[in-house]
Image (cartoon, rainbow, N blue to C red):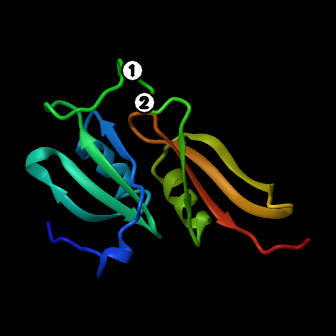
């Protein structure tokens, strides 16, 4: 696979979650093919891929090697208590792709207003679970109407 690397150190994010997955091909089928993430680089021999979408990065690492860093037993759904939010410019397009793939929504599309530093922030968002149960929230900021 051709690597698509950032131009300089400033382009690399300072925090990238690494998710252990049961099947890298199954995960890529969703993350890349349905959700639109691009493969930044991969190591097929290690069942590993670095993905990015609109500035949000994530590593997918298939379970089963000596470097699986587990703090405790790993049971499905993975990532309990965690949802990863990706701020995207067109949440409707990703939502349509998820629905076309027949994937169930954890949280249907909604518009929600959050208080941020005393101001309101309006978003359109939905949540879908990946094949291992990680919750992925896709969110688009809406124009502020007070």
Residue visible at 73% across and 61% down in the picture: 123
Q: In this view, does 138 lie to the left or right of 21?
A: right
Q: Are marks 1 and 2 in contact (CB under 8 Å)?
A: yes
Q: In which quarter of the image is the N terminus?
A: bottom left
Q: Is residue 99 above or below residue 13?
A: above
Horizontal arrangement in the rendering, residue 85 relative to residue 146 (left or right): left
Residue 67, above or below 2: above
Nearest the viewer among 142 and 17 is 17
Residue 24, picture quadrant: top left
Q: Is residue 10 above or below residue 72?
A: below
Q: Nearer the viewer, residue 68 or 107?
A: 68
State the image coordinates of residue 28 (x, y, percent, origin top left). 30, 51
Label 2 Cα crowd, 10 Å radius (few <14 / some 14-19 / many 20+): some
At horizontal 24% and vertical 54% (from top left) the residue drawn is 49
Q: Residue 75 carries which label?
A: 1
Q: Name the residue under label 2.
A: 78
Residue 76 in picture, x, y percent from top left: 41, 24
Residue 135 shows which numbered tag? none
Q: Which residue is drawn at 84% across and 63% down?
A: 120
- Residue furthest bottom in the image: 7
Task: Tell whether 24 sits left or right of 45.
Answer: right
| Element assignment for label 2 | loop
Q: Residue reaching furthest right?
A: 146
Q: What element carries label 1?
A: loop
Residue 4 screen position, x and y as percent: 24, 74
Q: Is residue 9 left or right of residue 99?
A: left
Separation of disc 1 and disc 2 at Cα?
A: 6 Å
Q: In this view, does 141 lie above or below 17?
A: below
Looking at the rendering, which quadrant does residue 91 occupy? bottom right
């Amino acid at each position: 696979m051709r690597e698509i690397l950032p131009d300089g150190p400033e382009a690399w994010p300072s925090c990238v979650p690494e998710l252990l997955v049961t099947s890298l091909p199954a995960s890529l089928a969703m993350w890349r093919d349905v959700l639109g993430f691009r493969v930044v680089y991969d190591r097929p021999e290690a069942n590993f891929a670095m993905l990015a979408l609109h500035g949000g990065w994530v590593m997918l690492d298939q379970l089963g090697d000596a470097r699986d860093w587990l703090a405790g037993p790993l049971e499905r759904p993975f990532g309990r208590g965690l949802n990863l939010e990706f701020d995207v410019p067109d949440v409707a397009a990703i939502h349509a792709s998820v629905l076309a793939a027949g994937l169930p929504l954890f949280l249907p599309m909604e518009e929600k207003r959050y208080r941020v530093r005393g101001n309101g922030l309006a978003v359109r968002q939905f949540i879908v679970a990946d094949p291992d149960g990680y919750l992925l929230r896709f969110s688009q900021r809406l124009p502020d109407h007070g």
